[in-house]
Image: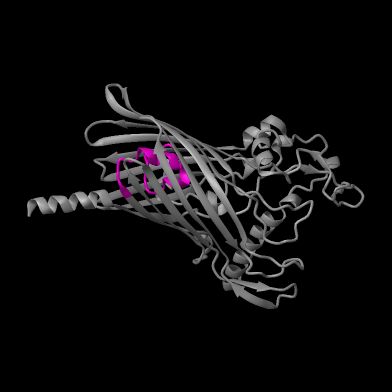
Amino acid sequence: MMMFYKNMKELALTLSIVFIGSVAFAQTINYNQLGGQDLTQRVNTITTAVPFLMISPDSRAAGSGDAGAASSPDANSIHWNTSKLAFSEKQLGVSFSYTPWLRALNIPDINLLYLSGYYNYPSLGTFTSSLRYFSLGDIVFTDINGNTIGQFKPNEFAFDAGFARKMSNVFGMGAAVRYVNSNLTNGTFVDGSATRPGRSVAVDISGTYRNDKIKINKRNAIFTSALSITNIGSKMSYSDNNNATNQGSFLPINMRIGLGLTVDMDEYNKISIIADINKLLVPTPPIYEVDPTTGSTISNASGGYVIAEGKDPNRSIASGIFGSFSDAPGGGTEELHEFNYATGLEYWYNDLFAVRAGYFYEHPTKGARQYITLGAGVKYNVLGLDFAYLIPTAQSNPLANTLRFSLSFDFDAFSAQNKESKRVD
């Protein structure tokens, strides 16, 4: 069992290094042997550096199908949509979340930790920040002969700082800056080349429309729509051995469109329906020409590879973002497959107890993440506790059958409680 445990973690690390350092080689398909195959039915998953930035960090959104762009503002908003904090009615909030990883494989030391919070300064705006830490546990590195050459704890972290402000009574904007550090190898040589931590700086931009003056069947309701583009930043590289076929990997630049509707059913009960649409704004891997006699990828004059279908993924950040809507080898149909969908339902009783459910869908050719989520939350005075549970419906998932939780602190309630105590005294 210990050997299996060790090998699984080494496999996870190896896959991370391969995906991050060699994206250009992921689709070396012999175009001459496709034989008229429908390109839109071919698995063509988009890979990026530091995918941990896309993991849902908090249990509230995780229990709602990983939808969070248009939900009510909370301490974790900077991950989903910084701008919705412009509508926060509370002054200060802090949250801590813990997400275990690969527990179904009996691996106890891979996890994601997330600390976030905000401060609302009424006449200026809302300041927010977060720290995300992803640990891959203890890894034993070996050479080609299986000899141990070292032991290391690979880890990744990101630190964010953001600001949100109302531009009108119904519209707010937000921005955040993010520093990312990914240390997967501790300088270990891979294929004869020295490695180093990958580092990058990225920004988020977002906008939220929120109308709390509408009525549905004579009941008070809030409609929210949002657009958030996250992780716009420089490419990340884990070595200095870059060339025409490997110019660093894109960050997971993501566009998130959110819709939300909250209805007060009566004095004690309210229900929210939310939905997110996501798309990675990075190049889709093309199909490369392969020499049928040697089976090797055909090189071009510039040192890159000959592309049979699609576009060269080694391009600038701006070109990658705008070109991501028209570069799939399978054309418009494949581009539509690159959108994934998250929907969630949240019910609150008297702002004390919440029940959540949701569903996430990703096309089978683009990763096949499809799962149901369940969640619950309770509030007691200044303390809030949220839980989330994931049930895969299409394939295994690193979070399958895993309970994760978030702990939040409502300092406004704490202040109100102190004032009430002083008044009674």
The location of residue 141, given as percent across then percent down, is 65, 72
User: Which image quadrant: the N terminus?
Assistant: bottom right
Camera-side residue: 413 or 121?
A: 121
Residue 11 occupies quadrant: bottom right
Could you tell me which residue is drawn at 48 percent across and 43 percent down? 175
Count the labels in the image.
0
Residue 344 occupies quadrant: top left
Q: Is residue 46 visible?
A: yes
User: Does residue 303 appear to the left or right of 65 in the view shown?
Assistant: right
User: Does residue 55 appear to the left or right of 172 in the view shown?
Assistant: right
Question: What residue occupies the far top of the structure in this picture?
Answer: 217
Camera-side residue: 285 or 175?
A: 175
The location of residue 406, given as percent across then percent down, is 38, 54
User: Which image quadrant: the C terminus?
Assistant: bottom left
Q: Give the range drawn in magenta.
A: 69-92
The location of residue 179, given as percent across then percent down, is 54, 55
Question: Does 360 appear in magenta?
Answer: no
Residue 217 occupies quadrant: top left
Could you tell me which residue is drawn at 71 percent across and 51 percent down? 23
Question: What residue occupies the far front of the structure in this picture?
Answer: 123
Camera-side residue: 272 or 226?
A: 226
Question: What residue occupies the far left of the structure in this picture?
Answer: 425
Could you tell me which residue is drawn at 75 percent across and 60 percent down? 241
Image colouring: one colour
Question: What residue occupies the far right of the structure in this picture?
Answer: 293
Question: Does 82 appear in magenta?
Answer: yes
Q: Is residue 68 visible?
A: no
The location of residue 28, given as percent across then percent down, is 79, 48
User: Does residue 260 appear to the left or right of 394 in the view shown?
Assistant: left
Image vertical order of residue 147 relative to residue 87, above or below: below
